Image (cartoon, grey):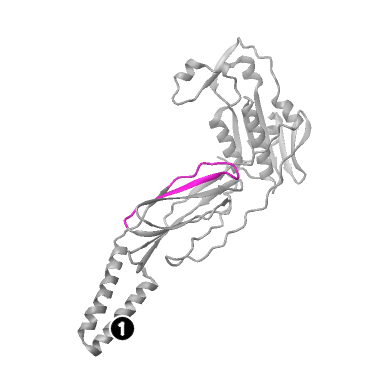
Amino acid sequence: MRPTLRSLGVAGVAAAAIAMAAASGARALNALAAPALLTLLVGAVQVYHAGTPEVTRSDPTPGHPGESRTVALSVDGGALARVTDAIAPGVAGTGYDARVTLPATVEYEIELGARGEWELGPPRVIVTDALGLFVRTFEPEATATALVYPQLVDLRETDAIARLLGIDTATDRQAFDSIREYAPGDPLRDVHWKSSAKRSGDDLVVKQFVSERRESTLHLAAGAATGHTDAMASGVASLAVLALEAGLSVGVSCPAGEVPPGRGRAHRRHLLELLARTDAGRLSESARKRADVVLDADGDGVTATVDGRDHPLSIARTPPEPTEQETPGADDAHAAPVGRDERPRGEVGR
């Protein structure tokens, strides 16, 4: 706990009153010094007994660059406070900086930027009394992660990709094999209504046939030279999403790890999370040989290898690295929030 400039001013008034009392009598002391000293005492007691505020928060929903998200923090306690929250350079926004009465839930908007994992926080809570005479600063270890998926681009005009996703197998629709979760692009005639009715929520399942199960799996493998990871991740994510929307079962192998083939919204999320966290690197030859499509990103761009033939993809080059935000001072209750230069957390193979 420390005094503010305002409390030093009140203390100066009290000291002047006491000096005047020594020369002119106790009435000046009672009229000026006593209320000033009492105000200082009450302010100090309020801040001292405010306790340590606790902050709870959750990660914002992951998304693609350019999408907006709401960041929310719940701060408990029972005092006046100034709450600030810093954001990393991988997301765009001003952070949060406002005075509230605790307990309170504060919210602010961010815009997702560069692919990767970006840390939000830690928050700073500056507790003060009603008159702003004393402050106590707390920095709870409450951070959140903004996960930014790769940028999606439209690859449907690439002839090799269009042929790959347009394969129409001669499915024997009488040879029923199993059921699976509905994926965008599945025809409604394939919905298994009895099984869907037994599931909670609005989730649907569709019938899967023997030949469809055998021929509709697409495995993607990808690697990138240093400095070209974003382009690689964008190409793989774009192709994977197109394949999922076409009803294919999609698996991905990249330097961060592997997701086996699957379908549905949850599987799509797992693929995008893996690609959001991947770093540069090259897969083994055995992994590349097992894949139906191999994507490589380097200084010449992104190339997709399909059936032994290379096809260049129209993927934008990696954008400039996010720059460090300025870090203004925040030593008192009237300072601006602190910015942090947080980088993506590197290779995460989980």
Q: Is residue 283 visible?
A: no
The x and y percentages for residue 88 are 55, 54
Q: Is residue 311 left or right of residue 128?
A: right
The quadrant of the rendering that contains the N terminus is bottom left
The amino acid pointed to by label 1 is: Ala
What residue occupies the far top of the structure in this picture? Answer: 174
Residue 250 magenta-highlighted: no
Quickly name the residue at label 1. 16
The quadrant of the rendering that contains the C terminus is top right
The image quadrant that residue 316 belongs to is top right
The image quadrant that residue 161 belongs to is top right
Q: Residue at x 62, y 54 (%)?
A: 322
Q: Is residue 132 visible?
A: yes
The x and y percentages for residue 324 are 59, 58
92, above or below 259, in the image: below
Magenta stretch in the rendered image: 57-78
Name the residue nearer the viewer: 216 or 113: 113
What residue occupies the far bottom of the structure in this picture? Answer: 23
Q: Is residue 231 left or right of residue 203?
A: right
Q: Residue at x 67, y 34 (%)?
A: 221
301, above or below 18, in the image: above
Name the residue nearer the viewer: 9 or 281: 9
Residue 72 magenta-highlighted: yes
Name the residue nearer the viewer: 33 or 318: 33
97, above or below 229, in the image: below
- Few, some or many C-alpha atoms within 10 Å of disc 1 (few <14, some 14-19, many ≥20)? some
Q: Residue at x 31, y 83 (%)?
A: 16
The image quadrant that residue 293 belongs to is top right
Q: Is residue 271 left or right of residue 290?
A: left
The x and y percentages for residue 172 are 64, 11
What residue occupies the far left of the structure in this picture? Answer: 26
